[in-house]
Amino acid sequence: MRKLLDARGASAALACVLVLGGALLTAQHKFGKPKSVIHIVTVNWKDGTTPDQIKAALDGVDKLAGAYSGIKNVWTRTVKVQGGMKNVIVMEFESEDALAKYANSDAQKEWYKVYLPVREQSITHDVTN
């Protein structure tokens, strides 16, 4: 009888280990490594720039993305920025080629009409996998 109880206990323990092990494997966080390019711009505005001018420059990013097909997504609402900068603008480009073709494009030139007159300084970072 004792051997039967030991066998049942061992079977129950093994079942628990298998269930818990399976749950741990299933619960592992999944993430991706896309090939798109993230273009991050931190900005300081010129002294005297009004909130309406800043809004126009940031709204211009949405217009820019609508005009340039190589941009997949944009972010313009700054949550946190360091290093004395005021705002962050992020654009996700489909590829490195799309980012390269963006430079001096008609869409960029149009946005720059609103952005450059109020931009004091910007620092740009481009990241991909």
Image (spheres, grey):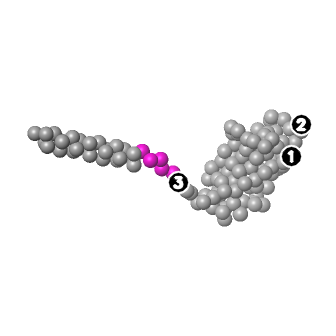
Query: Residue sitting at 66 percent across and 54 percent down?
Result: 38
- Dot 2, crowdedness within 10 Å: few (<14), some or many (≥20)? few
Residue at 69% from the left image edge and 42% from the top image edge: 76
Q: Is residue 31 left or right of residue 105?
A: left
Was residue 31 drawn as part of the magenta stretch in this picture?
yes
- The 10 Å Cα crowd at callout 3, few under 14, some 14 to 19, many 20 or more, is few
Badge 3 or badge 1: first in the primary sequence: 3
| Marks 2 and 1 in Cβ contact (< 8 Å) | no
Residue 88 percent coordinates (x, y) = 73, 44
Count the marks: 3
In the picture of the structure, the residue carrying the numbered disc 1 is 120
Q: Which region of the structure is painted magenta?
A: 27-32
Badge 2 or badge 1: first in the primary sequence: 2
Say which amino acid is labelled 2.
Gly
Vertically, is 118 above or below 32? above
* Residue 28: x %, y % from top left: 44, 47
Q: Residue at x 78, y 51 (%)?
A: 123
- Please state, as top left, top right, bottom left or bottom right, where the C terminus lies in the image: bottom right
The local crowd at label 1, few if under 14, some if 14 to 19, many if 20 or more residues have their Cα within 10 Å, is few
* Residue 80 visible in the shown view: yes
Residue topped by disc 3: 32
Q: Which of the image's four quarters has the N terminus?
A: top left
Q: Main secondary structure of the magenta part?
A: loop
Mark identifier at residue 48: 2
